[in-house]
Amino acid sequence: MTEPSPGTAGIQGAHKVASARAGLQVSEDHHLCPGCGHPVAWRILLEVIEELSLAQRAIGVVGHGCYTNIVRMADIDFLQCLHGRAPAVATGVKRVQPQAAVFTLQGDGDMASEGLAEVLHAAARAEKITAIMLNNGVFGDTGGQMTAASVVGQRTKTSLEGRAPEVHGYPVPVAELVAAMPGAVYVARGAVNTAGGVAQTKRYLKRAFETQISGEGFSLVEVLTMCPTGWFVPTAAGPGYLAEQMQPTYPTGPLKDSLRPI
Amino acid sequence: MTPMVVSRGTVTIDVERCKGCELCIPACPPAVLHMSTEVNHTGYRYPLLSPGCTGCRACHAVCPDYVFEVYKYDRPRAIELSSPPVAATEVAP
Amino acid sequence: MTAALLQGSRAIADSAIAAGCRFFAGYPMLPFTDLLEAMSAKMPDVGGTCINADSEIEAVNMALGAGAAGARAATGSCGQGIALMQEAIAEAALNEVPLVVFNMARGQQDYWQATRGGGWGDYRTLTLAPKDVAEAVTHTQLLFHLADTYRAPVCLYGDYLVAHTHMSVDVGPLDFGPLPDKSWALDGTAGGTGHARQIWTWAMGRDDAPGPGPDVHWRRLAEKFAAMGDVEARHESFRCEDAEWVIVSFGTAGPFIDYVVEELRAEGVRVGSFRPITLWPFPETPLYEAAGRARGVLVYEVNAGQMVDDVRLAVRGQVPVRFIGGVSIDSSGMRQGDLLTVAAIRSRVMGAIAAGPEANR
């Protein structure tokens, strides 16, 4: 572990406006790749939980992927579950603890590939949970294979020449599918490749949890994150790749907000 | 008279935590971050701060390694442009 | 205590609710479907939840989540659907979530599935195989107690006959002592206190509060299952004290074997019946002792020969073990066929006895 950030004692004549760690974070040592977008998504998720005063109500149901490391890093209740099944597991949790703020944290491999049935059915049942998909278009933890969310042309370990529709078919737009379910009351897609995107995505997460707490129904936030390792690009090229290769297939913005017209 | 730049804020940078991803560099609107030539204990270069920071928190927003803490000065400060870039800041008033 | 004439599925549902089960999820599949319907009708009355899930995989994972959040939770199916649930059953074993699984099987062909487990890792699934509805009622409540005591998945091996037979039973609550502590269950309240809870098969804990990690955790679990095996075996035997031939059977085949034993004893044939009640842990020691007093062991099960492996392990070669069962399904595909009749069983027992011990190897 590294030493706490220098200057935490404060700077004369200045006030702190951003802390390195989110309040619920207990560690920074996530061991993920340089330039990975997941830790950015973790931070805004934990900030939202804290800002909505949900720390003593939150239960995270975490799938399998690089992002599973959040379980080591945050001081909230966690249940690490089987690949793809988090929305079903979260259903059981929420039905037994209806006062809890229950969320899933899954990758695109977890939700779009293995667990597509689970998330669609949970949305259809209007379960009062918040599902979060970190979408980088690859199975990062297993070395960078194609998922159901990989975009056309994307090179992965199982589509080395680039995803070709005639061979590999087309990507699955999870946010659009979930938004079509009447039980889904809030669906949005954000991206963490720019400061503006990070701020916007944080607002989407906040709104999603608000709809759960007020008992409206199912909410989903899809978060596009960078995976320069899985994308075979230099670390610093991650944000540009996300904007140019991922966002055309996955436009960001709110898709559905049952309480406010979009 | 030496050129002066107004800084409205500053950051502290945990250079040992940095993994050299450089995402903060293009994210900084006043472009006051640039990478060092030295490396930290893990072998990564890390960002250095020049005068002109606005305390906007963009670097903090995009950093995957929780490197930055961001401060806003109670009053903006004029700093000599030729001041050497720093990693951790306690800037003389 | 009031007895009522109840269909087995309904009796099991009532018994589970009497035990405090407040979450049930399942996917329709005969002969399990009636249990799902009974739960669907009764759970709202007690403020519980029954979800008709959209797959067996969903159902078992929902029940796992409910159990992790502290409820007495259950799911079920028949063998084909239980096959889909294997990963989650192993998960519950390895992250120590109590879970009761009802296999209302289409016969006796799921013995291996129940005892060998199709999941991953070093785990065992304690399995009770009732002989009739009355035993199923008792076993149901016992299973919730054992699941909580050991923080593990446990299984009721029922079948078509248990599910659909009507029997006069009392489904009042049974007392197994104080409820085990469930402070490990997730409710969110420990968040931000430095003591938030985790349920994780890898047991890695947090960077500020490291867990044992998979190596230590899974070793402790293996020891837990071994300890379970040492104390939780159950069986029933009839006329084995002086039996020359011990006939081993499980589940609903048991009463048929007992009937044949009684008939043959009246004719002077020294047979006895031995019925494991727990398929795992298998009651090895009492079977070894019963076999030691006999000339041979006959194994009757309605499948191609599954429990016979465990019988051979238990008998340890003292006397010959002969399989006298077989595959038998009725025309609906849902239940045992013609082999599960007194006449067929008598014929096979007498044939084995006439052939003598040496022919029974």
Image (cartoon, rainbow, N blue to C red):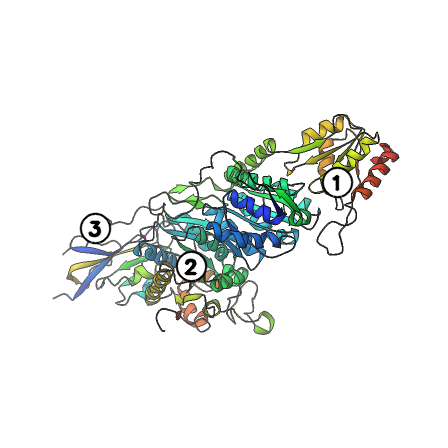
Name the residue nearer the viewer: C179 or A86.
Answer: C179
Residue A128 is tagged as 2
Answer whether labels 2 and 3 touch (C-beta < 8 Å): no
| Residue wearing tag 1 | C256
The quadrant the N terminus of chain C occupies is top right
Residue C297: % across, % down: 78, 33
Please tell me whether residue C50 is drawn above or below residue A182 in the rendered image.
above
Magenta-drawn segment: A21-26
By secondary structure, the bulk of the magenta-drawn segment is best described as loop
The quadrant the C terminus of chain C occupies is top right
Q: Is residue C50 visible?
A: yes
Element on which disc 3 rests: loop
Residue A97: % across, % down: 42, 51
Q: Residue at x 54, y 58 (%)?
A: C53
Counting labels gives: 3
Q: Is residue B91 visible?
A: no
Residue A10 is tagged as 3
Q: Residue at x 52, y 67 (%)?
A: A155
Residue A224: % across, % down: 42, 65
Element on which disc 2 rests: loop
Between disc 2 and disc 3, whose residue precedes? 3
Identified by mark 1, the residue type is Phe
Element on which disc 1 rests: helix
Q: Are marks 2 and 3 on the same chain?
A: yes
